[in-house]
Image (spheres, grey):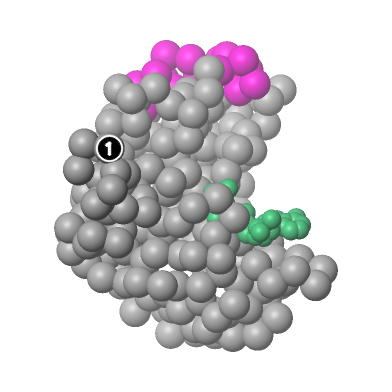
């Protein structure tokens, strides 16, 4: 396994946000974590990238226990993240934002910049525009592009479709598929369960800090409980 989250418990003060979450991500996979608001999806990603401390459990990357490794070292080790709410630098240009993504890396960044511009032509067109004046969807592209500039082995994406128009949602999922096809492993958190399950190889369902299901993504698309709870198409749902 490239990334293994073993039975992690995470607290905010005395509130338990994660109560024993185990997730595995294999090299080359797209894995998705779906669940309702407050289920612990963002907390899981933040804990993997080192922004939240573990109460117990462990995180393994490339066979190494990284549970106590500081966040910037995890980034250098190959764990990249495009955070929820984007977190781009509003006063910096698109280009400067992208260069920031590569700051911890050695070697030339020209090739990576070229690839990011290929994936997101809009970013190339707007390279000199301040990040903060980009539209919501463009900022989402910028956040993903910036994460790619670090050349991560695994890319953590927190709700990449949030706030996007339906056409752009489809586009962002297609781009994630392309990123994966080019060799980057992806762990993506989504409330847009339908599309996430169509995209991913495997999926985990999170409910109030616990994994309640894990299966090949396609199986969950047909799972009556998942359909009812997350796809709005189960028994009792309108039109079912
Ligand atoms: N900074 C914080 N302080 C206190 N509690 C927090 C904090 N951040 C998150 N929580 C709590 O931890 C739980 C998990 O939150 P988390 O943000 O991981 O959920 P999520 O699955 O990403 O939800 P959403 O779909 O709304 O983004 C929630 O009950 C939330 O209220
Ligand atoms: Mg969240």
What's the magenta region? 118-134
Element on which disc 1 rests: loop
Q: Is residue 10 left or right of residue 32?
A: right
Residue toward you, 164 or 100:
164
As displayed, is residue 141 above or below residue 74? above
Residue toward you, 150 or 65:
65
As displayed, is residue 168 above or below residue 198? above
As displayed, is residue 223 above or below residue 107? below
Instruction: Tell me which corner region of the image, top left, top right, bottom left or bottom right, holds residue 115.
Output: top left
Instruction: Tell me which corner region of the image, top left, top right, bottom left or bottom right, holds residue 8.
Output: bottom right
Cβ of mark 1 under 8 Å from ligand 1: the answer is no
For disc 1, the marked residue is 238
Residue 204: image x %, image y %? 37, 66
Residue drawn at (43%, 46%), measured in percent from left and top? 191
Q: Residue furthest right?
A: 13
Residue 126: image x %, image y %? 48, 15
Residue 95: image x %, image y %? 54, 26
Residue toward you, 91 or 11:
11
């Amino acid at each position: 396994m490239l990334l293994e989250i073993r039975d992690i418990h995470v607290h905010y003060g005395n509130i338990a946000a994660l109560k024993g979450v185990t997730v595995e991500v294999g090299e080359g996979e797209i894995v998705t974590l779906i669940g309702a608001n407050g289920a612990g999806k963002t907390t899981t990603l933040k804990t993997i990238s080192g922004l939240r401390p573990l109460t117990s459990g462990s995180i393994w990357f490339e066979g190494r226990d990284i549970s106590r490794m500081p966040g910037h070292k995890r980034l250098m080790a190959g764990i990249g993240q495009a955070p929820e709410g984007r977190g781009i630098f509003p006063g910096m240009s698109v280009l400067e934002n992208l260069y920031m993504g590569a700051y911890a890396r050695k070697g030339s960044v020209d090739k990576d910049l070229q690839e990011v511009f290929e994936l997101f032509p809009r970013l190339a067109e707007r390279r000199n525009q301040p990040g903060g004046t980009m539209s919501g969807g463009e900022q989402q592209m910028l956040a993903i592009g910036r994460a790619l500039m670090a050349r991560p082995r695994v890319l953590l994406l927190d709700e990449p479709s949030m706030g996007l128009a339906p056409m752009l949602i489809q586009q962002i999922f297609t781009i994630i598929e392309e990123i994966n096809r080019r060799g980057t492993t992806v762990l993506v958190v989504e409330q847009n369960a339908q599309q996430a399950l169509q995209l991913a190889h495997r999926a985990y369902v999170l409910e109030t800090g616990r994994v309640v299901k894990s299966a090949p993504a396609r199986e969950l698309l047909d799972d009556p409980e998942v359909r009812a709870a997350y796809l709005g198409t189960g028994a009792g749902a309108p039109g079912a």
